[in-house]
Amino acid sequence: MNIFEMAQIPFNQAVEAMKLDQGVRDIIANPERTLEVSIPVNMDDGSVKVFTGYRSQHSTILGPAKGGVRYHQNVSMDEVKTLAFWMTCKCAVAGLPYGGGKGGIIVDPSKLSLREKEALTRGFIDKIAPIIGEKKDIPAPDMNTNAQVMGWMMDEYSKLTGQFEPGFITGKAIIVGGSLGRTAATGRGVVVAALEALKLKGIAPAEATAAVQGFGNVGSWTAKLFCDEGVKVVALSDINGAIYNADGFDCYKVDEYVQKTGSVVGYPGSKEISNAELLSLPVTVLAPCAMELQITAENADKVQAQIISEGANGPTTPEADEILAKKGVLVVPDILANGGGVTVSYFEWVQNLYRYFWTEEDVIERQNALMRSAFKEVVAAAEKYGVHMRVAAYIVALSRLIEAMKIRGIIH
Ligand code: GLU
């Protein structure tokens, strides 16, 4: 089974619970459009290398396609299509006026010089330019892409159209139309989701402990904001390994250490543990913020956390979901828990359209309110349909998509 088919298992469970027609299911199960492009790049050593990239517009039922672009050696069309499908559902759960999309380039960006990376980025935009735009499809950062990459993309697209185009892309630096609060937004959402889940379980943040897998943008902000909320973060990790301290980390200090050394490993006063150990620690909250497919049929039974708040896209397999549900672990699914990034991307886009910018307090307040209300809607759907939160999140998303399809006459 490929990742695209696997991702549809909880979605199909939602279709079943809602007793939907096969045809309606099929509309949402398949991307509207997926483009594959070849990008030639003149490399520093004088050679020419051709890279493969994708942009999948999964749905434009609720608005323009929206979603990030990732640079990774394991990118595939199936993965991009799956991530685009998740974006559609994520935006619909949050109630944003967006469809879903995703892009990716098959490349290990750590092997590129800055100049090569810029050339690749500009080449990618040249190739996908016909299908993107402020009202069509709005890219953003994802794995291994950041505000600098967004800046190059914005510049290239502005050159192609001959006008200043901040609203065609989000996750930009503030000086070119980015939003305050965007960098921390995904991590903030993971923490908001975890705090709501703690409330459901009647646990105070000060009594809770957390383990965070991954220390990229999402993981590092999740960890730091957990610290702000008084949650004791006892374990952290990155691709080089995992660290543990029963007394809890000052995650801001760990971040400073990572800026200097490049890894969490070796942080003073920490004990090195394995990634498998991190996932099975007896913590209150586990926040997988790294990659897809981390909690599987093989290790789900070992999970001792009471709550999982998913910062990564697709960190838990459908088999693991069943095991965790039986164990009574409350899983706040990715399409709800990591929707903070795209939520603040939406705020950035709104600010770009108005050319009027909000304070960071405004952004945070609106993000918190929006995510808390999405969380409550998903909990209500879970109760109404007697399903776990992942299936409930798909039910909320599907309800919105179906309502819009009916009004637009896509279905009768
Ligand atoms: N890449 C992020 C995600 O997977 C953010 C997407 C966006 O802001 O459009 O949710």
Image: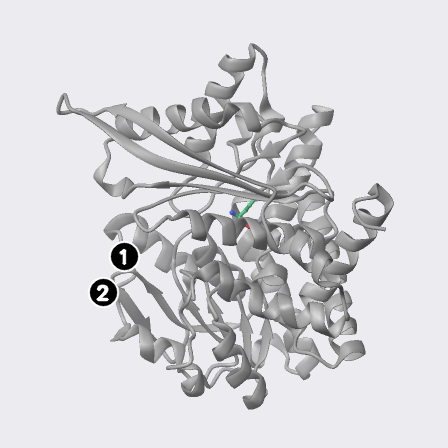
Residue 329 image position (x, y, % from top left): 56, 83
Question: Mark 2 — residue?
Answer: 266
| Crowd tier of the residue under label 1, counting other residues whose Cα lies within 10 Å: few below 14, some 14–19, many 20 or above | some
> Which residue is at a point 27% across and 72% down the rendered structure image?
269
Where is the N terminus found, in terms of image quarters? bottom left
Question: Mark 1 — residue?
Answer: 263
Cα gap from disc 1 to disc 2, whole angstroms: 8 Å
| Snapshot colouring | one colour
Q: Is residue 350 above or below residue 294?
A: above
Task: Tell me, yes or no, if residue 79 can be seen here.
Answer: yes
Of helix, strand and loop, which one carries label 1?
Answer: loop
Q: CB atoms at circles 1 and 2 under 8 Å apart?
A: yes
Front: mark 1 or 2: 1
Which image quadrant is residue 122 in? top left
Check the image and name the residue furthest to the top.
162
Is residue 141 left or right of 271 when viewed as pictured? right
